[in-house]
Image: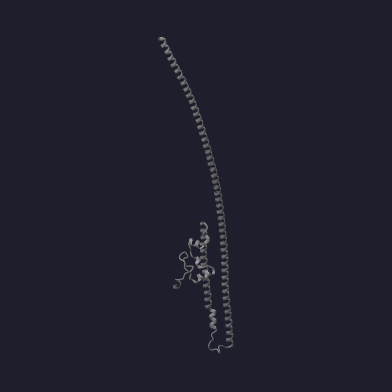
Amino acid sequence: MEGNEHKISLQNCDFNKKRTRLNSPFSIMACELIGINDKDLFFISKEDYIHQNQECINLTKELQDERYEHFNERRLNLIEEAKKKREELMNESNNKSKYATFFKNDPLKKSASSDTVIKPGTVNGFGSSSAIKEEMERLKKMKERQEINIRLQIDYECAMEEIRRKNLEKMRLKEEKEERKRLEKNNKLIEKMKKEEEKEKFRKKKEEEKHQKMEEKRKTEEKMEKMKQEEEQKKLVEEEKERKKQILEQEKREKEFRDKVFQMNQQQFNRLIEKQKELNEKDEKRKIFMEKKKEENKKKIK
């Protein structure tokens, strides 16, 4: 018991804790027979798994989770398969021990061994003719028992070989089934990845088309806005020109009016001057007339 306390086997190893190495012969042999390394049976975190499998880095979180779950499921299946193989090896070893014990404790074999001992009282190991005949019978029986033992040994070896062959065939079929499942799952995974890629391409294409339409709409709006601004600018220029034209015409009309008013005023002023002149002349004439009249009156008075 003390010699087994430090042994680490498939049965007592905790594959979810810190990694160690199996040192139990049956466990090591079981792993070798099913073609796995015992380090592949220990738990690793999702981050470490993705880091060790670079192809998973660019996958979506959903696909990463699915790949990691598949890895853990296969790891647990391998642990169970290795444990079963270990049990088969231990049972096979126990069967061999039973057969060896049977051959070792065979009473016929012991009898044959005791029968070969030369009894005292015989001459050179042989007695009378009946003793020789008896000895020959014993030798014959011993030979028959040896042949039976040989046949039993051969049958045992054949049975063990048949068990090994069936186990290998069973393991091969199981591996093929596992491989088919793995391929099917991988194919499904690949198909799913392809669908995801197609979906992503379609989404990107839609986004590009949407972006292109928005860009075209923006350019059209910018063009329309530019044209509108140009039209407004042109309209403003025309309005400014028209305003200036109106101002000039107004100024011209005002100038013509001022000139006309000035001319009219000038004419009126001239008429007033003429009239004043006429009045002055009349007044002068009246004065002269009055003077003359006064002189005449003076003369008359004298």
Q: Quadrant of the C terminus?
A: top left
Residue 65: where, in percent of width, then height? 51, 58
Residue 116: where, in percent of width, then height? 55, 84
Residue displayed at 44% across by 16% down = 288
Q: Nearer the viewer, residue 60 or 37?
A: 60
Farthest residue, direction bottom: 123
258 over 179 or under it: above or below: above
State the image quarter where residue 158 is shown. Answer: bottom right
Figure disc tally = 0
144 over 122 or under it: above or below: above
Q: Quadrant of the N terminus?
A: bottom left
10 over 218 or under it: above or below: below
Farthest residue, direction left: 302
Residue displayed at 56% across by 60% down = 186
Q: Nearer the viewer, residue 229 or 300?
A: 300
Q: Is residue 286 left or right of residue 224?
A: left
Residue 148: where, in percent of width, then height? 58, 77
Residue 153: where, in percent of width, then height? 56, 76
Q: How is the image coloured?
A: one colour
Q: Nearer the viewer, residue 163 or 278?
A: 278
Farthest residue, direction top: 301
